[in-house]
Image (cartoon, rainbow, N blue to C red):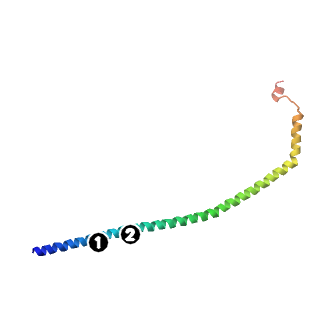
């Protein structure tokens, strides 16, 4: 009976070692799968990020061109107004200067309305 017990114990010990090997392999496989899953997820994140960056650049290019056109239109309009101001200055500048000189030289003092009202 002792030999049978010894053989049974040895069989149990062998089975336990085999089970430990299986458990260790399962742990290693799980760890490997976790690493693989992380790297796959990181790749997907990078691809998604790159895709969104490209979409943003495309969106920005489409919409910033509208701002450039509006800026160009505003600059053209401003140039036209500046030209109008220069033309008006050339046309009426001499008369304005003459009117200013005349107003400074030909002084006609008049008493204030308060002084006239109190008198």
Q: Position of residue 92 (x, y in %)?
A: 87, 47
Looking at the image, residue 19 sits to the left or right of residue 101; the answer is left
How crowded pointer 2 is (Cα within 10 Å; few <14, some 14-19, many 20+) is rated as few
Residue denoted by label 1: 22
Are the residues flagged by discs 2 and 1 in contact, CB closer than 8 Å? no
Look at 79% across and 53% down and name the residue there: 81
Q: Position of residue 5 (x, y in %)?
A: 13, 73
How crowded pointer 1 is (Cα within 10 Å; few <14, some 14-19, many 20+) is rated as few
**Rendered position, 80 above or below 38:** above
Residue denoted by label 2: 33
Task: Determine the secondary structure under disc 1.
Answer: helix
Could you say which is closer to the camera, residue 2 or residue 96?
2
Mark sitting earlier along the chain (2/1):
1
Look at 15% across and 75% down and name the residue there: 7
Q: Residue furthest top?
A: 119
Q: CA distance from mark 2 to mark 1?
A: 16 Å
* Quadrant location of the C terminus in the rendered image: top right
* Quadrant location of the N terminus in the rendered image: bottom left
Could you say which is closer to the camera, residue 91 or residue 50?
50
Look at 18% across and 73% down and name the residue there: 10
Q: Residue furthest left?
A: 1
């Amino acid at each position: 009976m002792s030999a049978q017990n010894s053989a049974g114990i040895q069989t149990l010990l062998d089975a336990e070692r085999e089970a430990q090997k299986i458990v260790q392999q399962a742990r290693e496989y799980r760890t490997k799968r976790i690493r693989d899953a992380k790297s796959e997820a990181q790749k997907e994140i990078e691809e998604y990020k790159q895709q969104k960056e490209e979409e943003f650049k495309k969106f920005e290019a489409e919409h910033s061109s509208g701002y450039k056109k509006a800026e160009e239109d505003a600059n053209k309009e401003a140039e036209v107004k500046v030209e109008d101001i220069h033309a008006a200055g050339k046309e009426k500048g001499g008369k304005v200067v003459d009117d200013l000189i005349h107003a400074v030289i030909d002084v006609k003092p008049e008493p204030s309305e308060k002084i006239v009202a109190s008198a």
